């Protein structure tokens, strides 16, 4: 069946894209990308590659490809992947779970020394903005938080921005002319679902059965999403701001913050989603396998199905009815996937966001996903790109319900004033990192203001 699906997808791809349009993005020349890089900006594309050691041996390493406007491309070796990824994994632990300021300082300085100092040595003095395209595990670093040897944040010296690829800089994505904003906040996770279907013990799973959605999320099946009153406060504050600017605003909260409502949207200027995010790694080494009692509750053993290897089904957002869906899965019921409250990255890719200038994911871990070298992050990031969004604001770890209200308010005000969302986030993040370090210390500053990135 999987072979049949692959053949059908291949035939469909040929029908929907003419030969001169197919893979057009890969036909770009370096000069075309350089032409859209401003004079005070560089593009840094990190690359994880196999370094040849001779006699048929190689080892993974990292390097940086650097493009400047009007200059020759630079290739800068950075070191062994094992050493760099060990630092990156330690970074994730330290910023997520709290840490001693001294230990975090050492980690941030080591990462800066390894990933940035070799690049900075060859840069012109006029560089003010850095556009970063990370690869592999570097996708989960907030480069703005790195510290130089004088213990200054990288964000204090440069405006740090992101792109999935340098090719994205030449994409022509004109935003909607109308300033219509949709705010989604504080969903009613225990909303009663209208439809459920009992799953027979001997039934085999199908994509349309609905039960697959729940079984694939083995960790999600043990979650219970709590209310987020702070997100509704955030939404109310933003609504007041948008109305001051005479921007049309629609707010979806509580029972109205549904998956069905998002499916019915057609290219709002801004889509702001303030809710819980979730991510389950597709890496079997890090998965928490269901125990026998969990499998019995779900009636069917799905462990051998390759269906669940798709990382686009392992991350997403919780909407109205999410808790009710999880309870139904545990009973062996299958709520309708049309409005089950679980919006996976795969679901996101089918939304109509063409002309959407900005999507803000004001939730935890929305920038997570499975990394594949050279392909970016397979998760919500990829889903919103495929849906047509121009700019995507994400988080790399859990965020504070209270502090985020202030950061979001400042960000939108700056975005409105400048018309440049990536620049607005860079400026606001710089301000909050410095402010919180003074008030609460380094670890708190990085944890609270560091997770926000914009692609």
Image: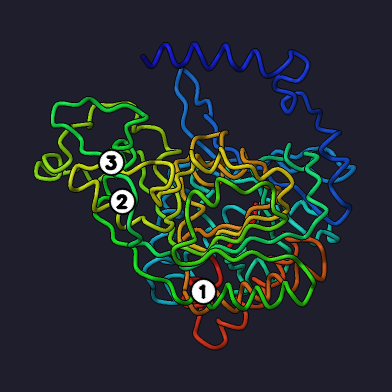
Taking 198 as reference, is 357 left or right?
right
Mark sitting on residue 232:
1
Whole-number angstrom distance, CA of label 3 to CA of label 1: 30 Å
Residue 80 in view, yes or no: no
Looking at marks 3 and 2 on the same chain, the residue that comes earlier in the sequence is marked by 2
Of the pair 388 and 291, the residue shown nearer to us: 388
* Number of numbered callouts drawn: 3
Report the residue marked by disc 2: 325
Q: Where residue 377 appears, x then y in whole percent?
A: 52, 42
Q: Where residue 265 appears, x then y in whole percent?
A: 62, 49
On screen, 238 above or below 286?
Answer: below
Mark sitting on residue 334:
3
Say which quarter of the image contains residue 103: bottom left
Say which quarter of the image contains residue 66: top right
Q: Residue at x 79, y 73 (%)?
A: 245
Q: Residue at x 41, y 12 (%)?
A: 3
Whole-number angstrom distance, CA of label 2 to CA of label 1: 22 Å
């Amino acid at each position: 069946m999987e072979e049949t699906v692959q053949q059908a997808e291949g035939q469909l791809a040929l029908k929907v894209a003419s030969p001169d349009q197919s893979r057009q993005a890969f036909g770009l020349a370096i000069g075309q990308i350089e032409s859209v890089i401003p004079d005070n900006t560089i593009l840094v594309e990190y690359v994880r590659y196999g370094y040849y050691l001779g006699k048929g041996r190689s080892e993974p390493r990292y390097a940086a490809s650097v493009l400047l406007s009007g200059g020759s491309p630079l290739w800068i070796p950075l070191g062994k992947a094992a050493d760099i990824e060990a630092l990156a994994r330690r970074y994730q632990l330290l910023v997520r779970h709290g840490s001693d300021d001294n230990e975090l300082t050492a980690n941030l300085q080591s990462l800066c020394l390894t990933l940035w100092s070799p690049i900075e040595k060859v840069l012109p003095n006029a560089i003010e903005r850095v556009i970063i395209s990370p690869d592999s595990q570097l996708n989960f670093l907030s480069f703005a938080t790195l510290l130089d040897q004088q213990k200054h944040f990288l964000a204090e010296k440069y405006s740090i921005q992101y792109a999935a690829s340098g090719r994205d800089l030449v994409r022509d994505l004109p935003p909607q002319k109308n300033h219509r904003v949709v705010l989604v906040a504080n969903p009613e996770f225990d909303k009663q679902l209208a439809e459920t279907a009992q799953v027979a013990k001997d039934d085999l799973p199908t994509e349309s059965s609905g039960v697959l959605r729940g079984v694939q999320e083995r960790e999600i099946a043990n979650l219970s999403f709590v209310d987020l009153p702070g997100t509704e406060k955030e939404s109310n504050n933003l609504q007041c701001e948008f109305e001051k600017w005479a921007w049309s605003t629609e707010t979806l909260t509580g029972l109205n913050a549904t998956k069905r409502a998002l499916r019915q949207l057609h290219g709002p200027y801004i889509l702001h989603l303030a809710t819980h995010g979730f991510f389950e790694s597709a890496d079997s080494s890090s998965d928490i396998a269901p125990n026998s009692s969990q499998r019995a509750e779900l009636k069917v053993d799905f462990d051998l199905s390759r269906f669940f290897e798709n990382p686009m089904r392992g991350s997403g957002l919780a909407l109205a009815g999410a808790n009710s869906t999880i309870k139904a899965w545990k009973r062996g019921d299958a709520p309708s996937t049309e409005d089950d409250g679980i919006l996976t990255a795969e679901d996101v890719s089918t939304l109509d966001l063409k002309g959407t200038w900005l999507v803000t994911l004001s939730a935890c871990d929305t920038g997570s996903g499975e990394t594949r070298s050279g392909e970016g992050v397979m998760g919500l990031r990829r889903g919103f790109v495929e849906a047509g969004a121009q700019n995507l604001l994400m988080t790399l770890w859990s965020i504070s319900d209270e502090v985020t209200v202030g950061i979001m308010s400042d960000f939108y005000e700056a975005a409105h004033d400048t018309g440049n969302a990536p620049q607005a986030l860079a400026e606001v993040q710089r301000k909050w990192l410095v402010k919180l370090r003074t008030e609460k210390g380094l670890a708190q500053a990085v944890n609270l203001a560091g997770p926000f990135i914009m692609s």
